[in-house]
Amino acid sequence: MTTGVGGMPLSVGAREAFLAESHIASLAVEAGNGRAPLVVPVWYDYSPGGEIRFLTDGDSHKARLITKAGRFSVLVQRDSPTYRYVSVEGPVVRSGPTTLDDLTRISARYLPPDAVSGYVQGSDLKVLVTFRMRPDHWLSADLGALG
């Protein structure tokens, strides 16, 4: 399901291609106890038709909330013409220890090529967990050239 809010919804292909670009995502997860959802920025990986992957410290507040809720949302946006966003929500389909491949692939989306190796070598794989989510609800819009 694709719904546009204040703009034209993106086609399935366009929304998946946009999500596959290397945006910083805002991840939201239910916080419980009458609190608003926890919303934090994350690096992620996505290929059209696949699952969203991101990694975090397994003992983090974010990881505990996602494990408890069993689902989360991700929002990515572009703030230059044409303005657009894609938001997805879905269940966690798998979580487990982060592999060297997971860490390398995700960091390579965001860091300059010459910085990836040092970043990966300086990370502690023993504490990282990779979560995988299958998008099952989509919101998207191209808001055009506002302003």
Image (cartoon, rainbow, N blue to C red):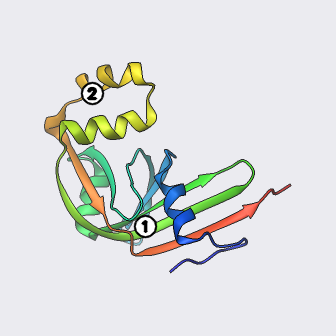
Q: Residue sitting at 73 percent across and 54 percent down?
A: 82
The residue beneath circle 2 is 120
Q: Residue sitting at 49 percent across and 72 percent down?
A: 138
Secondary structure under the numbered disc 1 in the rendered image: loop
N-term mark: 1 or 2: 1
* Residue 85 placement (x, y as % from top left): 60, 60
Q: Residue sitting at 81 percent across and 57 percent down?
A: 146
* Residue 136 placement (x, y as % from top left): 39, 75
Amino acid at pointer 2: Val
Determine which quarter of the picture holds residue 57: top left
| Discs 1, 2 touching: Cβ within 8 Å | no
Kindly tell me whether residue 65 is visible in this rendering. Answer: no
* Residue 28 placement (x, y as % from top left): 43, 61
Q: Residue sitting at 26 percent across and 69 percent down?
A: 70
* Residue 18 placement (x, y as % from top left): 54, 56
The residue beneath circle 1 is 35
* Tally of numbered tags: 2
* Left or right placement of residue 90 versus residue 8 in this view: left
